[in-house]
Image (spheres, rainbow, N blue to C red):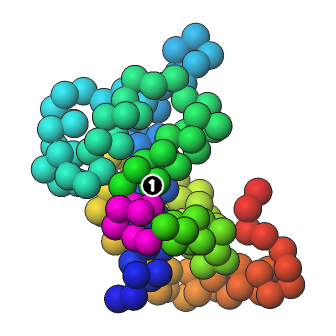
Amino acid sequence: MKDADQALQDVLEVFQFEYWLRFYFLLEEGGDFFIRLDEKTIERMALEYPHLVEFARRLNETHLTPEISRKLVGEHLFKHYEGQRYKPGLTESVLDGREFNQEMYLFNMWANLHERQLDEHLFPFERWETMFNEWKASESGAKVLDAARMQGASGQSGRS
């Protein structure tokens, strides 16, 4: 896999992991939102996602807004990928790329379409990844992907 392809996968994984954390562990207290992870959950994450556990710890107990969440994702990406795993500029290039935006559009669409199923119990993050990839390969996923590509071709963004 080329560096750009692997960088895309790594960046997507961080964004999708953050979404998964918010989906299952976001709590509201007095109008403020926090991700709350107990020590047992963090220990399990350290075994299952050692490359993401530091990020989970950073989000844990942090007052989150959309802006703070984006900032923390960016900090993680630039600390661990930009200039570390990948040449300078590649992570930013991925974030600005059409493929990243399409994949995130698809992921958000999948999560919204399957919210009831995902909410039935706490699925491990790797199960989310598997279910998402299976959906993308399905007929319904292919239709959404084609629609996203058409939007991109007409100059429209998949972001809301």
Disc 1 marks which amino acid? Leu
Residue at left offset 34%, top offset 40%: 56
Residue 144 location, quadrant: bottom right
Reply above or below: 73 against 64. below
Residue 85 colored magenta? yes
Residue 112 seen anywhere in this rendered image of the structure: yes
Q: Is residue 93 above or below residue 77?
A: below
Q: Residue at x 57, y 41 (%)?
A: 71
Residue range highlighted in magenta: 81-87
The C terminus sits in image quarter: bottom right
Image position, residue 64 (x, y; %)? 55, 29
Q: Answer above or below: position of 38 versus 140.
A: above
Does residue 49 appear left or right of residue 74 in this picture? Answer: left
Q: Which residue is mark 1?
A: 77
Image coords of residue 44 (percent x, y)? 16, 43
Q: Main secondary structure of the magenta part?
A: loop
- Residue 124: image quadrant is bottom left
**135 with respect to 71 (left or right):** left
Residue 23 can be seen, yes or no: no
Q: Measured along the vertical axis of the image, is residue 83 above or below residue 124? A: below
Q: Which residue corresponds to the image point at 58% horizontal and 11% vertical from the top-left?
A: 30
Q: How many marks?
A: 1
Q: In the rendered view of the protein, which quadrant contains the N terminus?
A: bottom left
Residue 83 spot, x, y in % from top left = 41, 63
Q: Quick check: 40 left or right of 146? A: left
Give x and y (percent) for residue 92.
58, 65
Say if the magenta span includes residue 44: no
